Amino acid sequence: MTCLQIQKGSEIKEGDWSLFYNQIEGFEYEPGYIYKLIVLEEKLPDEKVPADASAIKYTLIQVLEKKRG
């Protein structure tokens, strides 16, 4: 499975990446770039979450930065 590597917060720290298996609605990743994003994390009601899905929906608000990685 392909996944993104992410960091939360305003500073990028070398080697401090976590795997992110969800999708960010409205975001199209282009390989070879590092992005700084503002993303809305929305907790979904339990009755709307399938058994094999995340309880959090991620939506792109803004791309702050895009640079070659």
Image (tube, helix red, strand yellow):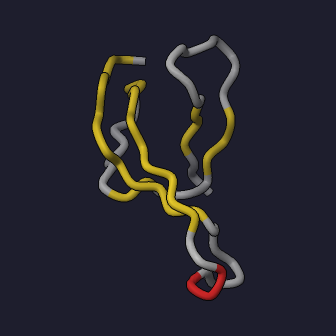
Residue visible at 47% across and 56% down? 58
- Which quadrant of the rendered structure holds the C terminus? top left
**Quarter holding the N terminus?**
bottom right
Determine the residue positioned at 31% across, 45% down. 61
Residue 30 position in % (x across, y down): 33, 38
Nearer-the-camera pick, 54 or 47? 47
Q: Nearer the viewer, residue 5 or 64?
A: 64
Question: Can you give x and y, in whole percent of width and height, for residue 31 in the image?
Answer: 39, 35
Q: Residue at x 57, y 52 (%)?
A: 2
Q: How many marks?
A: 0
Res 59 quadrant in image = bottom left
- Residue 43, given in percent of the width and then of the height, sits at 57, 64
Which quadrant holds residue 64? top left
- Furthest residue toward bottom: 47
Q: Nearer the viewer, residue 48 or 27?
A: 48
The residue shown at (54%, 42%) is 4
Instruction: Say above or below: 34 vs 51.
Output: above
The spot of residue 51 in percent (x, y) is: 71, 83
